[in-house]
Structure formats: structure tokens, C-alpha cells
Amino acid sequence: IEDGELERHVRRMRTTYLARRDALVGHLRARLGGALVFEAPRGGISLWARVAPDIDIAAWLGACAARGVHVSPGSRYTFHGEEPGALRLVFSALTPAELDRATGVMATTLRAVSGARSR
């Protein structure tokens, strides 16, 4: 701490997390703007997004998981597992390229799940 290493690390991580947040926010707005409502967090490691009420969250996230993209449903963070109609999207551990792939899978699977439901 005294030699400034911790402060340098915090500065590096803040820059890294902001870049990852911005990548996620950009991809979500471009690909899932009609399905998710959210605000870019000022800091942190994740963002919360409200899901449009006509979307079957369980089916969507199941299809994402089948393609290797694991998204945390809001129900995971409630006391009794009730579905709040929201997702927690963690960006801190993923590179911008990984976030690009993940949001691409989310968009593709949402179209597939929505299309199957509307037939």
C-alpha cells in the first residue's frame, strides 16, 4: 500500500471495468434494446436490466446456457426465488470480445425463443 501499488491497481481496474461496461452497454443497446431496459452503472462489476414482460426468461436463459452463455436471472437474488423480471449481467470478468459474443448469443437465442413461441 505504501509504495502505491494498490492505488495503481485500482486505477487500472477502474479503466478496465469501464471499458468492459461500455462494451456491454453498447452491444445490449444495439442488439437487445427492445427486450431490455437498463441504465449504465456509474461503477461496479455488473448491471441490472429489466426484461420486457412478454419474454419467457427461463426459456431464453436456458437457450443461452445451451450455447455456453450463462446469464443470472433476477430470481437468483431474491429471498424466495420469485422472478422480478430482471437479469444481472456481470461484465467485469469478460473481455470486450467475450461480451460481444455473449450478447450475440443472447440476441440470437431470444429471436429463436420468441419465434418458437409465436408460431
Image (cartoon, grey):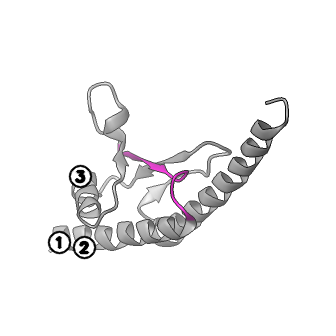
Of mark 3 and mark 2, the one earlier in the sequence is 3
**Residue at 67% of width from left, 55% of height from top?**
16
Q: CA distance from mark 2 to mark 1?
A: 6 Å
* Contact check, label 3 and label 2, Cβ < 8 Å: no
Asked whether 89 or 38 is in front, the reply is: 89
Q: Which residue does the numbered mark 2 point to in the structure image?
A: 112
Q: CA distance from mark 3 to mark 2?
A: 13 Å
- The residue mark sitting in front, 1 or 3, is 3
Q: Which mark is drawn over residue 102?
A: none
Q: Residue furthest left?
A: 119
* Residue 74 located within the stretch drawn in magenta: no
Q: Which residue does the numbered mark 3 point to in the structure image?
A: 58
In the picture shown, does residue 47 fall above or below 79?
A: below
Q: Secondary structure at mark 1?
A: helix
Of mark 1 and mark 3, the one earlier in the sequence is 3
Inspect this view and state whether residue 77 appears: yes
**Residue at 14% of width from left, 74% of height from top?**
119
Which amino acid lies under the numbered mark 2 shown in the image of this protein? Answer: Ala
Which amino acid lies under the numbered mark 3 shown in the image of this protein? Answer: Ala
**Magenta region:** 85-95
Q: Secondary structure at mark 3?
A: helix
Q: Which residue does the numbered mark 1 point to in the structure image?
A: 116
**Residue at 39% of width from left, 46% of height from top?**
86
The x, y position of residue 20, in whole percent, is 60, 59
**Residue at 85% of width from left, 35% of height from top?**
3
* Residue 94 located within the stretch drawn in magenta: yes
Asked whether 99 or 119 is in front, the reply is: 99
The image quadrant that residue 70 belongs to is bottom left
Q: Secondary structure at mark 2?
A: helix
Q: Residue furthest right?
A: 3
Inspect this view and state whether residue 33 appears: no
Q: Is residue 53 left or right of residue 3?
A: left
